Each structure stands twice: as structure tokens, then as C-alpha cells.
Image (spheres, rainbow, N blue to C red):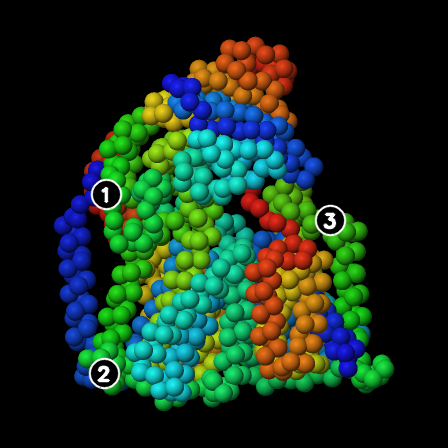
């Protein structure tokens, strides 16, 4: 019953790699994508990184949280303040912001996870409100409602991002790395443990899982990704204001996760891209857009609680077993060699 | 086969929830390789006792001693890590996860590696051979990628025992493994338990099916209203008048 | 000055407490927190504004119609958001559904009444003087009405038949249905009461804060009050909210713009020091 890499898997990985390579080379050209679309795509990737973190804590951990936006804001503001006010180098500022936010997430997680499920969620809204208040009122540091502008562009030592196309190249690679990290988490002990904590905390404890520590760790991971997204956002947009990091944004991130499919890393990508690009396309709805959005969410939860990837995986499973059942009329296969990826 | 080496000891344990006394001066021992039956009418406090041993509940007073060490104040997950395994009356799996992921929670426990090590691909000990043997006894097959919920109830219960055993516990607390199982499945559950004791695991078995209890257990502790009313060999216990009274007139089949 | 702050604080605490009570009712009845609760409160403000200024009803008319409208809204809300998902064992979907509802509600209100904050006259005009403090009558009115409502709810739940039915359904829905309680009616009733509480809260708060979409954010403070007082306990929620109101009021001594921040910091402190709150019950799972 050993696990081997099967041919179909090798093919799948190669194709994915080639596709990514193609996207990397072709998409960031003026002839293919206009500047505006590139900006939207970049924003999509940034949100995707934040949503990846959320998918760990919500998808695997089953915990609703509104902490994504405020911690994203924390990363963004620290980066912005360090570069514009104190003249730090962009890269250094980014790393400091990441470190600070992640440490903060740790202590925040320690405090918040003393609460049960829904109460934790509400407390996280409080966190979002708190940060919003600070961002809007600490005029000396954060510039208040006017925000901070003239944030320098990102550079990686050897490469400087001058325009949206440059940013795409960097963001794309970072995005892929983040995707792989989260997908790997899903398949490793941490992911399984989180799922156990999510589905049955008592059983999880009886299987040796330190539920509190696991939950806090998931919050730290979510915080890391959120702050990374914030830092990238600050350098790309070169201007930030409190409005971007309101609790409403957190709600949108949650919906992105649910839309794409809460059990799927790829679903997070789908959900994010759809909800970043669709609003552009649906501008004709104008003032009714948010209403449709809100009602749409209610309908989504009723009709497709497992999201798009949920429906896809459901169909795939049914197909798989229809085929298997046809192959063996009496017995089921023992220990499939193939491990289907999402 | 009981080895006369006590691995788990419950000493003068008391537990009350509000005004309800669920455990009163309970004493019990389990030896390596022994099957200790734990029986009593419904509500006698059997599952509560298992929960006290697992660490889900804290004792009001008394001690839980494992391998000679006092674990009364150790949290539940650490108790699991040092070798106290558990199954539940209702199978407690992760419904959205595949069978593979569910079983791996058991082997993860046995491997004892941290999240980081697992993330970076450190492989635990190979468990497939062992799994094969256990599934041979359990008597059914499954597809790794199957949802756990696709298995019928009986198979899920058996799989729970398998998962607990994959974690290589030293003591296994088994809560009504036969409930809801047909004759053949009960036999398989029994075989799994025999395999466990052959490996030197001490088993605490809660069961209502008297057939199973009488044939399988080495010694039995009988609880009623949280108190131990009898203890001894199956034949002694089944003839104990107090026990018969407690059950209102004798044998009770599951 | 301290008397002024104290009364203001208690009065704001009353408003938070009304919201909190409504929230806890829903939590106990259906087991999930309602994220649109702030928006229901906001809706209350707008509806009463409509009744007062657009339909130009007299005070008692507003009160009467208000309660009826609130009840209808409560039931409507339950049907559209909670009822379809009532059998889902996965609570996250209901949570996200209420999230969608909060977005939708905010937009509906904006589409109907616009984004400009509306002003509303206090129910009782004028200022009373107590010692050296000058207070709007409105504040005192809030305390009085709030107290009366709480008394009313207490009587409803402890003394009346309907109240007992609602409690039974909240404790065990399945068992309640088995003994013949119409579950749907009971849950609808709970939502209606909850909405009435929040709606009246919105009505009372409106003259002080202008009717706008940001009224919804007051739910934060209500929640902080619930945590402070110990969740699961209505009594605790009320005490907690009153405390939060006082803290918020007195914090004006130190700072003005950071009052929200202070409230949340208190929340965090409580979580760290005593997660179960003042009256909290230790909630342990059944194994």
C-alpha cells in the first residue's frame, strides 16, 4: 500500500509548471494586459496571499475571524511609517513589519483563543475596530484619514519594481510560494491536527493534540500572511489609508474563502480572483452591487456551502467511484495508489 | 495475557457535577496485557471514569497513576501522548476529511514529531504493514481517498479501534465497541482487542453486551451510581448478588 | 461632572445592554452569533425615523407601530437568514449568512434613506439639572425605558407561558418539538423579541447619534459587555454592558478619539485575566 507518484500526477505537475511559466512570461506585457488590468490582477494576488492565511484558520481550523484586515493594516502601516517617516530601506521595513505583526499575532492569538468559536469571531471584529480607530486617529504617526503617501517601491536588491508589470512578476512568485506552503500545510500534521480541532476538539485532545497551541499557531500563520499582504500592498499602491483595512474588508476575505471552497487551497485562489475581478465587470449594477453581493452571500451559503471547489470535488468523487464500481463489480479497491490532489 | 504489571491505577477518585456524584471513591487497576471490564447500569459513571482517566474531566480528589507516575494534573493531550488511547461510543472522526487523513492523526501521534518536522516532509515510521494486519482482522477494505462518512457505522467503529491502535498506546480505553454492531462485527472487534493485549496494551472495556464482557475480560469492575460495587473475575462478578440486583435481575444483552 | 458622566455612561450602557440581550436571546435560541445584529439596531433607528418623520405619527403611534414593525422585521430576518440553514450542523455557514445579511441590510438602508446621516429629535426635549450636572432628558429616558424593557423581558421569560416555550426550545429544540411545541413559532418569537429590543435601542440612540449606517458598529460595545459580564448569562450581559458604558463615558477624561480603543483594550484584558467574565459559567463540552 505504498504511495507512489503516478503518471497522471507527473503529467499534472508538469503541466501546472508550464502553465505558471507561461503566465509569468506572457501576462506582464503591455501588449497582453493593459496597465489597469495588471493593477487589478496584482491586487488580486495580494488579497490572495491574505486569504491564504485566512484559509488556514478558517478552512482548516474552522474558526471565523475578522483579523485579516487589521493585521494587514498593521503590516502596511509599519512598512509605510518606517520608510516614509524614518527613512528605512523598503526591504528592511517590510521584514520588520512582518516580524512585528507575526509576534503580535502570537500574543493576540493567546488572548483570543480563550474564547469559544463565535465569541472569538466577535472579539476579532473588536480588534478590527480598534485598529481602524488607531489608524484613523493617530495623526502624528498614521496621518489619520488622509493616510500615508509616497511609500517607496519595493525592491529585492537586484530587482526594482518600477511599474505594475514588475510588481506582477514579484507578486506572482511570492504568490506561488505561499500557495505551495499552505497546500503543504494542508497535507501535513499541522493541517490534520487543525482539522481534528475543528471537527471534534475532545477527540483531538485524546489523540494527543494540544488544541490551544494548535489554534494559536494557526492564528500566527494567518497573521503572517495577512501582514505580508499588507506590506506588499503598501509598496505597490504607494499610498494607504485606514479605509482599506476596515472590518468590512475582513468580511470580504471571509466570503472569498467560502466562495472558492473552504477545504481547498486552489479554492482560495478562485474565490479571491473572482471577487476581485468580478466587481470590475459588474460595474453596471452600480449602487445595487453591494445589495446583490450581500444577498448573494446568503444564497451561496444555502446552495453551495462548500464553495466552487466543493462542488467540483464532489463531482470528481462521484465520477471516480462510478468508474471504480464499474471496474470491480464485487470488491472495492484496497489502498488506492493514487492520491488525488485538490 | 495479563502480566501482573500494573500500568494504570485509579486511586480513590471522586467527581461530582453540581449535585450529581458520578464517581465516589473509585479504585481500579489495569495491568499490561489485561482486559479490565467496566460495567454497570446506564448512568453508573463508566464513561465519566474514562473521561477522568483521559483527562477530559478533572478529578475532584484522588489520583490517576500511569506507569507509576501521578498524572492527575497532566492535561488530556499530554496523557494521550504518553500512551493513553481512547475510543468513543460514537465514532469521533473528522467528517470532512478522508479516511487517510483520519488514520494519520493516529500515526502522527505515534510518530511524535512536531508540526514543523512534518511540514518539511520528515517521514514517520512506516505503518502500512501494521495497518494491513489490523485491517485483515477488521475484515474490510477501504479506498484511501474515501470520505470517512462513506463507511457504514460498524466499519467506522472498528476503524476507530484501528486508529487508536496505530498510535501504539500503552493503555486503551474502549467505550462500548460493540454497540450497534452485528454479530460478525462484534467478533472482529473482539479480535482486535485480543491483538491489542497480545502487544501488551492494557485495555479498559466498557460494554453492555454481556457475552463479550464475560468471554473477553480478565477482570471486571462494576460501577453503580459512581461507586464500585464489585470487582473480580467474570465468574465471581456475575454471581455477585449486588451486581445482579443493580442490573435488576441478571444478564442484559446489547 | 462625575454625575453627568455616570448617568451618561449608564444610559449608554442601557442601550448596549438592550442590544446585548437581543443578541444573547438569539445565541441561546439557535446557537449561533448574529453578525447582523448591529445592522438590526441600525434598522431600528431608521424605521423609527421613518415612522416619526415620514409618516409623521405621534409618539404613541411610533411606539406601537414601531413594535409591530420590529416584530415583522425580526420574523422576516429569521426566515430569510437563519431558517433555511437551521438543520445544517456546520455553524460557519450560518455565521457567513448573517454576514451577508449585514452587508445587504446596510445597503438596503442606504438605498432607501441615503447615505447622509439623518437627525432625530429627542423624545423628550430639554435639559435637567442635577447638582452641577446638565443632562439631556433623553439620557434619563433611556435608563427608564431600558429598565422597563428589561423587566418586561424578565417577566416574559420567567412568568409567561410563551416565555417558557421559548426557553424550552432554546434549550433543546428536538425535545421541544417532540412535546408539541411549534418550533418555528417559538424561534420566530425569539427573533421578534430580540429585534424589538434592538430596535427600541436604535430608537433611543438615534437622537443622540444621528441615524446613519455607522450605528451598526455599536454592536461591538454590546459584545464587549457580554464578554465582560460573562457570556451565556443575560444578567452578566446587562451588568457588563453597563460597566462598558461607564468605562466608555469616564474614559473621556483621558482621551476623546480613542474611547473605542479603550473599550476594546478592556475586552482584551478581561480575556487574558478572566475569560469567563464576571458571572461567567465555565463552558465545558460533554464528552
Q: Residue at x 28, y 41 (%)?
A: B144
The residue labelled by disc 3 is: C164
Numbered disc 3: what chain? C
- Disc 3 crowd, CA 10 A, few/some/many (<14, 14-19, 20+): some
| Callouts 1 and 3 close, C-beta under 8 Å | no
Q: Residue at x 54, y 74 (%)?
A: A130
Q: Could you say which quadrant of the image residue C117 lies in? A: bottom right
Q: Please determine if labels 1 and 2 lie on a single subunit.
A: yes
Q: Which mark is residue A160?
A: 2
Q: Is residue A194 visible?
A: yes
Vertical order, C133 against A110 (above or below): below
Q: Describe the element under mark 2 as helix, strand or loop.
A: loop
Query: What residue did someone put label 1 on?
Result: A323
Q: Quadrant of the N terminus of chain C?
A: bottom right
Residue B91, image x, y percentages: 44, 37
**Badge 1: residue crowd in 10 Å (few <14, some 14–19, many ≥20):** few
Residue B139 x, y percent position in the rendering:
31, 27
Q: Which mark is residue A185?
A: none
Residue B146 seen in this snapshot: no
| Relative image position of residue B222 (x, y in whole percent) | 56, 21
Q: Nearer the viewer, residue A31 or B241?
A: B241
Q: How far apart are labels 2 and 3 at the CA level?
A: 69 Å
Q: Residue at x 41, y 38 (%)?
A: B82
- In the displayed structure, C231 sits above or below B139; it is below
Q: Residue at x 43, y 39 (%)?
A: B80
Amino acid at each position: 500500500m505504498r504511495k507512489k507518484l503516478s503518471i497522471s500526477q507527473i503529467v499534472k505537475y508538469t503541466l501546472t509548471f508550464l502553465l505558471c511559466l507561461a503566465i509569468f512570461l506572457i501576462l506582464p506585457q503591455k501588449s497582453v494586459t493593459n496597465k489597469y488590468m495588471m493593477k487589478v490582477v496584482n491586487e488580486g494576488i495580494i488579497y490572495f496571499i491574505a486569504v491564504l492565511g485566512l484559509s488556514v484558520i478558517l478552512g482548516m481550523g474552522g474558526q471565523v475571524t475578522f483579523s485579516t484586515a487589521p493585521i494587514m493594516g498593521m503590516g502596511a502601516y509599519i512598512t509605510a511609517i518606517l520608510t516614509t517617516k524614518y527613512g528605512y530601506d523598503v526591504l528592511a521595513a517590510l521584514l520588520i513589519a512582518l516580524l512585528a505583526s507575526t509576534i503580535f499575532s502570537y500574543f493576540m492569538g493567546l488572548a483570543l483563543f480563550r474564547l469559544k468559536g463565535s465569541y472569538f469571531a466577535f472579539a476579532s471584529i473588536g480588534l478590527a475596530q480598534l485598529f481602524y480607530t488607531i489608524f484613523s486617529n493617530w495623526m502624528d504617526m498614521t496621518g489619520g484619514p488622509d493616510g500615508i503617501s509616497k511609500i517607496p517601491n519595493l525592491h529585492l536588491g537586484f530587482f526594482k519594481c518600477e511599474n505594475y508589470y514588475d510588481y506582477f512578476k514579484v507578486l506572482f512568485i511570492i504568490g506561488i510560494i505561499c500557495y505551495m506552503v499552505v497546500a503543504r500545510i494542508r497535507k501535513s500534521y499541522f493541517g490534520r491536527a487543525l482539522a481534528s480541532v475543528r471537527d471534534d476538539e475532545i477527540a483531538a485532545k485524546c489523540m494527543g493534540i494540544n488544541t490551544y497551541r494548535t489554534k494559536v499557531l494557526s492564528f500566527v500563520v494567518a497573521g503572517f500572511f495577512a501582514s505580508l499582504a499588507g506590506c506588499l500592498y503598501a509598496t505597490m499602491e504607494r499610498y494607504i489609508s485606514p479605509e482599506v483595512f476596515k472590518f468590512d474588508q475582513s468580511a470580504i476575505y471571509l466570503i472569498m474563502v467560502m466562495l472558492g471552497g473552504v477545504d481547498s487551497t486552489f479554492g482560495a485562489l478562485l474565490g479571491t480572483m473572482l471577487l476581485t475581478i468580478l466587481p470590475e465587470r459588474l460595474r453596471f449594477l452600480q449602487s445595487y452591487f453591494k445589495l446583490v453581493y450581500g444577498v448573494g452571500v446568503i444564497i451561496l451559503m444555502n446552495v453551495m456551502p462548500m464553495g466552487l471547489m466543493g462542488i467540483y470535488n464532489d463531482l470528481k468523487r462521484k465520477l471516480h467511484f462510478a468508474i471504480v464500481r464499474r471496474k470491480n463489480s464485487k470488491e472495492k479497491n484496497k489502498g488506492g495508489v493514487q492520491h488525488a490532489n485538490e | 495475557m495479563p502480566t501482573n504489571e500494573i500500568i494504570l491505577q485509579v486511586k480513590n477518585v471522586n467527581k461530582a457535577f453540581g449535585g450529581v456524584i458520578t464517581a465516589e471513591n473509585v479504585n481500579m487497576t489495569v495491568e499490561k496485557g489485561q482486559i479490565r471490564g467496566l460495567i454497570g447500569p446506564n448512568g453508573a459513571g463508566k464513561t465519566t471514569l474514562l473521561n477522568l482517566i483521559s483527562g477530559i474531566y478533572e478529578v475532584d480528589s484522588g489520583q490517576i497513576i500511569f506507569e507509576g507516575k501521578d498524572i492527575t494534573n497532566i492535561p488530556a493531550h499530554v496523557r494521550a501522548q504518553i500512551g493513553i488511547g481512547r475510543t468513543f461510543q460514537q465514532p469521533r472522526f473528522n467528517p470532512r476529511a478522508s479516511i487517510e487523513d483520519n488514520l494519520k492523526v493516529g500515526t502522527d501521534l505515534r510518530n511524535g514529531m512536531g508540526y514543523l518536522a512534518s511540514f518539511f516532509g520528515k517521514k514517520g515510521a512506516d505503518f502500512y504493514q501494521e495497518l494491513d494486519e489490523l485491517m485483515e482482522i477488521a475484515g474490510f477494505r477501504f479506498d484511501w481517498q474515501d470520505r470517512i462518512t462513506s463507511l457504514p457505522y460498524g466499519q467506522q467503529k472498528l476503524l476507530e479501534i484501528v486508529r487508536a491502535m496505530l498510535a501504539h498506546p500503552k493503555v486503551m480505553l474502549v467505550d462500548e465497541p460493540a454497540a450497534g454492531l452485528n454479530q460478525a462485527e462484534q467478533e472482529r472487534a473482539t479480535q482486535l482487542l485480543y491483538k491489542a493485549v497480545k502487544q501488551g496494551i492494557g485495555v479498559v472495556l466498557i460494554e453492555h453486551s454481556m457475552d463479550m464482557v464475560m468471554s473477553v475480560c480478565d477482570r471486571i469492575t462494576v460501577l453503580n451510581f459512581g461507586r464500585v460495587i464489585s470487582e473480580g473475575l467474570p465468574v465471581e462478578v456475575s454471581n455477585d448478588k449486588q451486581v445482579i440486583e443493580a442490573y435488576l435481575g441478571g444478564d442484559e444483552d446489547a | 461632572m462625575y454625575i453627568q458622566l455616570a448617568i451618561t455612561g449608564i444610559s449608554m450602557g442601557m442601550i448596549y445592554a438592550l442590544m446585548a440581550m437581543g443578541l444573547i436571546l438569539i445565541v441561546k435560541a439557535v446557537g449561533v452569533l448574529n453578525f447582523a445584529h448591529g445592522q438590526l439596531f441600525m434598522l431600528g433607528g431608521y424605521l423609527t425615523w421613518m415612522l416619526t418623520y415620514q409618516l409623521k405619527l405621534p409618539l404613541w403611534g411610533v411606539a406601537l407601530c414601531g413594535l409591530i414593525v420590529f416584530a415583522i422585521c425580526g420574523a422576516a430576518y429569521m426566515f430569510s437568514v437563519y431558517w433555511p440553514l437551521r438543520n445544517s450542523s456546520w455553524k460557519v455557514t450560518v455565521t457567513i449568512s448573517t454576514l451577508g445579511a449585514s452587508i445587504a441590510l446596510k445597503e438596503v438602508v442606504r438605498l432607501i434613506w441615503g447615505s447622509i446621516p439623518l437627525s432625530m429629535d429627542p423624545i423628550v426635549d430639554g435639559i435637567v439639572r442635577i447638582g452641577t450636572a446638565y443632562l439631556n432628558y433623553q439620557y434619563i429616558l433611556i435608563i427608564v425605558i431600558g429598565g422597563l424593557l428589561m423587566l418586561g423581558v424578565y417577566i416574559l421569560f420567567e412568568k409567561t407561558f410563551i416565555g417558557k416555550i421559548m426557553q424550552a426550545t432554546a434549550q433543546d429544540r428536538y425535545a421541544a418539538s417532540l412535546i408539541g411545541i411549534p418550533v418555528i413559532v417559538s424561534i420566530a418569537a425569539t427573533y421578534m423579541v430580540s429585534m424589538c429590543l434592538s430596535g427600541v435601542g436604535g430608537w433611543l440612540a438615534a437622537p443622540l447619534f444621528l441615524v446613519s449606517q455607522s450605528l451598526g458598529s455599536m454592536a461591538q460595545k454590546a459584545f464587549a459587555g457580554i464578554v465582560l459580564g460573562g457570556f451565556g448569562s443575560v444578567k452578566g450581559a446587562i451588568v457588563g454592558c453597563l460597566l462598558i458604558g461607564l468605562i466608555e463615558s469616564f474614559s473621556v477624561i483621558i482621551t476623546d478619539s480613542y474611547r473605542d480603543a479603550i473599550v476594546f483594550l478592556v475586552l482584551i484584558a478581561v480575556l487574558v485575566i478572566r475569560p469567563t467574565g464576571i458571572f461567567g459559567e465555565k463552558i465545558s463540552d460533554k464528552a
